[in-house]
Amino acid sequence: MVILTYKTRQPISFKNEKVSVAALIQKAVEPLLVPLELKMQRLHVQGDEGAAFLGDFNWSAEALINILKNCIEHTAEGGEISIHYTENTLFTEIIISDNGKGIAKEDLPYVFKRFYKGKNASDDSVGIGLAMAHSIITSQQGDITVKSPSGARTQFHIKFYKQVI
């Protein structure tokens, strides 16, 4: 069991159960179908149906929802978002990418910092979605990184490791 403590000092316990990545993605995408449809964005999902990791299904879904919301927000109408997932002997990997406007080079080191709003952030953004996703993933022995070539597309790499050495 992993504990994550927020500013409120309320401990959050994460379950340590087998999480099917296919089911996780389905749960994360479900509440975002309307925004995807409104922006006429296409979602492509591809991966190993048997891919899984040990973690907390609901908290992991919350992390993916926050990442996907970011992709939807920063991808133009008619754009594409893709999710690709695999599993190997070391880790389970989920790659979420979009063909949006990308993240400014100077913002990249700070996108996972709480309350950070990059140059391309919308007016109603408070800067906690990606920070929360980072916290949830890393609290489950995972890792998340982001790549974004200047002015074009963004790619989030999430890894849930099999065993921490």
Image (spheres, rainbow, N blue to C red):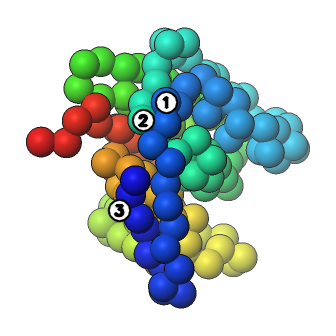
Contact? badges 2 and 1 (CB < 8 Å): yes
Which residue is drawn at the image coordinates 87% and 43% (left, top)? 34
Viewer-nearest residue: 36 or 159: 159
Q: Which residue is mark 3?
A: 108
Which secondary structure lies at badge 3?
A: helix
Identity of the amino acid at label 1?
A: Lys
Is 30 situated above or below 148? above
Q: Which residue is mark 2?
A: 54
Which secondary structure lies at badge 1?
A: strand
Q: Position of residue 58 (x, y in %)?
A: 63, 47
User: From mark 2 to mark 3, how far is it between C-alphas?
Assistant: 28 Å
10 Å crowding of disc 3: few (<14), some (14-19), many (20+): some
Which residue is drawn at the image coordinates 12% and 42% (left, top)? 165
Q: Which residue is mark 1?
A: 18
10 Å crowding of disc 2: few (<14), some (14-19), many (20+): some
Instruction: Please say whether residue 134 is visible from this viewpoint.
Output: no
User: From mark 3 to mark 1, how far is it between C-alphas?
Assistant: 32 Å
Q: Earlier in the sequence, mark 2 or mark 1?
A: 1
